[in-house]
C-alpha cells in the first residue's frame, strides 16, 4: 500500500506524547488505534527518538499498518494508517 494517503490526508486523530519515553508512546498509540476505524489516520506527536526509530515502527509492523514519519522541527509526526 502506498504511503500517499499518509502524506496528504489530514489525521483523523492526534496523540501528543511529547516528553514521554518508551513504552508510553507505543502503549497509548496502540490503545487509540483499537478505537479507530479502518482507513483512519492517527498522528502521534513525539520528541522521543527511540519511539520513532524502534517502538512505533515495531507496533505498525506487528499490526500490518503502514506508517510515515514527518520531522517537524524538534518533534516527529508519526502517522499510522489503520487498515482492515
Image (spheres, rainbow, N blue to C red):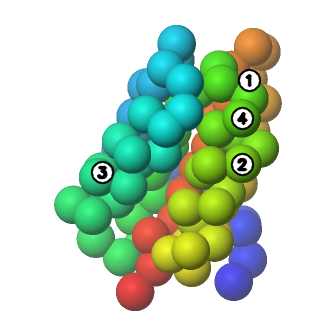
Q: Is disc 2 placed on a helix, strand or loop?
A: helix
> Cβ–Cβ below 8 Å for labels 2 and 4?
yes
> Is there a contact, CB below 8 Å, between mark 2 and mark 3?
no
- Does dot 4 land on a helix, a strand or a loop? helix
- Would residue 81 appear left or right of 48 to someone viewing this image? left
Residue 32 disc label: 3
The location of residue 69, given as percent across then percent down, is 73, 45
Q: Residue 58: x and y, percent?
A: 64, 61
- Residue occupying image coordinates x 67% and y 57%: 57
Could you give the CA–CA distance between mark 2 and mark 1, rounded to whole angstroms?
A: 19 Å
Q: What element carries label 1?
A: strand
Q: Decide if residue 12 is in sight here.
A: no
In the shown orientation, is residue 65 left or right of residue 74?
A: left
**Which is nearer the N-term, disc 2 or disc 1?**
2
Query: Could you say where residue 14 lies in the image, as x and y percent from the top left?
Result: 40, 37
Q: How crowded is mark 2: few (under 14 residues within 10 Å), some or many (20 or more)?
A: few
**What residue is shown with label 2?**
54
Disc with the residue nearer the chain's start (3 vs 4) = 3
Q: Determine whether label 3 and label 4 are within 8 Å by CB.
A: no
Residue identifier under label 1? 72
Residue depth check, mark 2 versus mark 3: number of the one nearer the observer: 2
**Which-is-in-front pick, marks 3 and 1?**
3
Q: Which of marks 3 and 4 is in front?
A: 4
**Could you tell which of marks 1 and 4 lies nearer the N-terminus?**
4
Amino acid at each position: 500500500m502506498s504511503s500517499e494517503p499518509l502524506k496528504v490526508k489530514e489525521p483523523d486523530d492526534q496523540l501528543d506524547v511529547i516528553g514521554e519515553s518508551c513504552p508510553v508512546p507505543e502503549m497509548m498509540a496502540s490503545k487509540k488505534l483499537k478505537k479507530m476505524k479502518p482507513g483512519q489516520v492517527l498522528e502521534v506527536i513525539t520528541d522521543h527518538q527511540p519511539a520513532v526509530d524502534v517502538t512505533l515502527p515495531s507496533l505498525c509492523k506487528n499490526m500490518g499498518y503502514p506508517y510515515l514519519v514527518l520531522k517537524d522541527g524538534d518533534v516527529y509526526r508519526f502517522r499510522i494508517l489503520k487498515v482492515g
